[in-house]
Image (cartoon, rainbow, N blue to C red):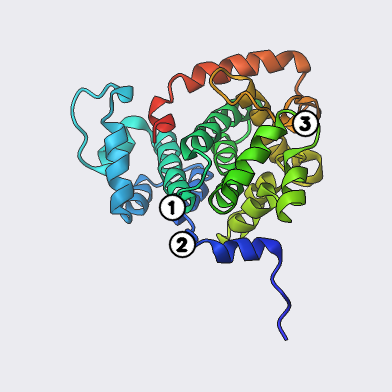
Amino acid sequence: MPEPKDRVEQYFDRIEHLPSAPTVVFELLELFKKQDCDIDRVVKLIARDPALTAELLKLTNSVMFGAEHRVDDIFEAVMRIGFYETYRMVMAVSGSKVMMKMGGAGAVPLRTLWKHSVTTAVAAEVIGGHLQESEATAFTAALLHDIGKIVLASLEGATFVRLLQEAGESEQSLVEAERAAFGADHAEIGSRLLERWNVTTDLVMAARFHHTPGLAAPYERLAAIVHLANVIAYSLPGEAASVPAEFRSGAASLEILRIPATSLSELTDLAGRALQKEKGLLEM
């Protein structure tokens, strides 16, 4: 007799169309880790997906890049904006598509969740650069860290919205409140989805422990970057007024990352300035 499915698997079963892995993103990330990246390989990967190609060309031709003439093919786009910027755009387009596919007509505004994901990703990228660690990995981990919220938002609707609101008024952590209400929390759900996608372990662990980075060993540094990026994101103008208790202080992550507390305001300022340049990603 088969064992009964746990709560997370039950949630996955309830999603009408569980999205498949954005494989192009993760293949590009692996290419980016190599010193000599083959641009032809990059172009071929992106060209597999016509919709992704169209979105990338649209973004490349947008005003945020100040294009003097229209770009009509992926090779020219990559040459113009650079491989890393191409990767960031592909990651953002793919993330937005996954979010919209799972979101349905839930009570949680998807644009609010997307804005927080992008804001956190930009902050993580800044932290990664400050630490001379992979900005691409930090950006990716942060953009994916709340994917479990989309599952809960689509299936638990108004109850999940209430928990989000109450998280800013209570000393109970958001994941504790979710486990009490639903039998699973968004961090576990998100990490289990990433496991289904065969994502590298560091990204899985960052999603699972972005509220409690000290538990993510041996991947606590990436989890701490995502945690600290949340702290910064929630402090920036335009973010939700309701801040979960675990993101009101970055002390634990600062200690893990060995960043002086005096540097937090500088990182926040850098993230705020970087975010001002990301209108295209925020409006996806």
Left or right of 140, for residue 100: left
The residue at which mark 2 appears reads as 17
Which residue occupies 80% across, 25% down? 251
Asked if residue 248 is positioned above or below residue 100 in the image, the reply reads: above
Query: In this view of the protein, which residue sits in the foreground, 171 or 261?
Result: 171
Q: Quadrant of the N terminus?
A: bottom right
Labels 1 and 3: the sequence-earlier one:
1
**Disc 1 vs disc 2: Cβ atoms closer than 8 Å?**
yes
Left or right of 77, for residue 27: right
Tag 1: amino acid: Lys
Q: Quadrant of the C terminus?
A: top left
Mark on residue 133? none
Labels 1 and 2: the sequence-earlier one:
2
Q: In 3D space, how far apart are the residues under numbered discs 1 and 2 (Cα atoms)?
A: 7 Å
Label 2 packing within 10 angstroms: few (<14), some (14-19), many (20+): few
Tag 3: amino acid: Ser
Q: Secondary structure at mark 2?
A: loop
The residue at which mark 1 appears reads as 101
Tell which tag, 1 or 3, sits nearer the viewer: 3
Q: In 3D space, how far apart are the residues under numbered discs 3 and 2 (Cα atoms)?
A: 34 Å
